Image (cartoon, rainbow, N blue to C red):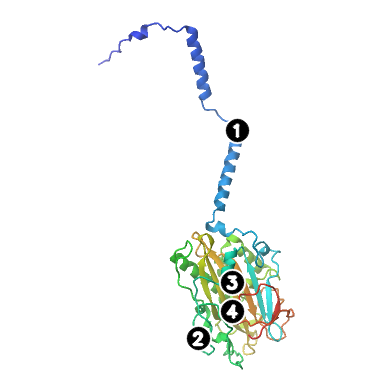
Amino acid sequence: MTTAPPPPREEDDEPSDLPDTVWEEFARDTAAKIRSDAPKEPSARARMVTERLRREDADAQERARAAKPRGRRQKRQEPEGWRTGPAWREMQRGERGPWRDRIRTPAIVAAVAVLALIAVNPSGARSLVLGHGHSSGSDETSSTGTPLPPETATPTAAPTVAAEPDAPTPSHPFAGSPALQWADGAAGIVLPHPAPAGDLTAKQVAAVLRTTKAFLVATNLDPEELRGGYPTAALRLTDPVNGVRAMMTADLRSPSAKADPTVWFTRYNPAHFRLVGSVVKVRGRMTFARADHGAVRVRTDYSYVYAFTQAGDPHGTVARLIVRRELDTQWYPHSDPGKVQIVAQGAEFGGSGCGFVDGYLHPYFGGTPGAAPTGPATDPYDRTKSLAKAGSCGTVSRT
């Protein structure tokens, strides 16, 4: 079956009224229009300019995202025009400035205090000093042998002991010390009840509180780390985002007066000293509160008391070392809950010699070499004040 073509229309057979010159001009104009509208392959120079503009636009968008107060990027920003103690720039290698405030025993040497603020904002610093927010712990009022309840607020007075305190012995290393009533080891680090804060949920807050406690244990109570071992667990728990972990490893690698690993870790040389037993007495509190941009700031203030004998003389004289540390960390909703980001930290050591640059603390047993005391006498058990900010070396009233 075939289909016949349609019959021609009458208008197709009619001659055009337009002259040939007009059709030719129309054809030329149409061809020119088609050529002008057709897509052209850009030149090499045009492609280079386009790529440069694209990169500049992408960089501008990245800078705009970086300026937003969110996530870890915000935690790296340094507030302008605010300085309390060594600032972030001064924390870089070779620019740290004075780090230690050393305090000695009535005989010669006894303590050290350090304060280092790292990229903190003014509101955070006020939180560090005032300790506001949720907390754990109570006033230190008991002066008997009864264990103290957890500390819930800054004590209003230094702890007291008997007028003639007992001398410590290897079997009773905390006799005559307020630490006798303190909790043993990690049991003294009591976590506050988690609750929503900032942009973090109660579950997220609970996770960061557990990580904070793990970091405190790793830096102050881990037996291997105390004996001068490499603090692998503590470094693994430290967020590298703001350079603090790199600073820690550099201090461990090359200890010096301006790069002292005891600022971060409690450690002694087992070739010279021996820890009495396995108990370290602990007292303090942990708080958390909302910070800027929906973050949560966790602040800890704990004192640790260690008892030592000299290596080779395990039944001889007992010397106590009192370490107090303040640690300020900050967390965002997108922060890794398994790593702490340190934004402020301070340490004070009672019963440790001044002037040592070997990366260890040196319990004082009398006749220990070290720098001469220059600062005022201090009670290392007095937790009523925040840590000193100026560097000095003085005496302590007791250990």
Nearer to us: label 2 or label 4: 4
Marks 3,1: beta carbons within 8 A: no
In space, the residues marked 2 and 4 are separated at their CA atoms by 20 Å
* Residue type, numbered disc 3: Val
Give how far apart the Cα atoms at labels 3 and 4 are.
11 Å
**Residue shown at 52%/57% (left/top)?**
71
Q: Nearer the viewer, mark 3 or mark 2?
A: 3
Mark 4 or mark 3, which is nearer the start of the sequence?
A: 3
**CA neighbours of label 3 inside 10 A, class few (<14), some (14 to 19), many (20+):** few
Amino acid marked by disc 2: Pro
Name the foreground residue: 164 vs 197: 197
Task: Label 1: state its secondary structure.
Answer: helix
Could you say whether the residue bearing mark 2 is in a helix, strand or loop?
loop
> What residue is rendered at 51% in x and 76% in y?
189
Quarter of the image where the N terminus is located:
top left
> Which quadrant of the view contains residue 320?
bottom right
Q: Quadrant of the C terminus?
A: bottom right
- Residue designated by label 4: 384
- The Cα atoms of the two marked residues, 3 and 2, are separated by 27 Å
The percent position of residue 13, horizontal first and vertical second, equals 36, 7
Q: Nearer the viewer, residue 186 or 116?
A: 116
Q: Earlier in the sequence, mark 1 or mark 2?
A: 1
User: Which mark is in front, 1 or 4?
Assistant: 4
Q: Earlier in the sequence, mark 1 or mark 4?
A: 1
Q: CA distance from mark 1 to mark 4?
A: 70 Å
Q: Position of residue 270 (x, y in %)?
A: 63, 79
- Packing grade of label 1 (10 A; few <14, some 14-19, many >=20) is few
Which is nearer the N-term, disc 2 or disc 4? 2
Q: Which residue is mark 2?
A: 147
Element on which disc 3 rests: helix
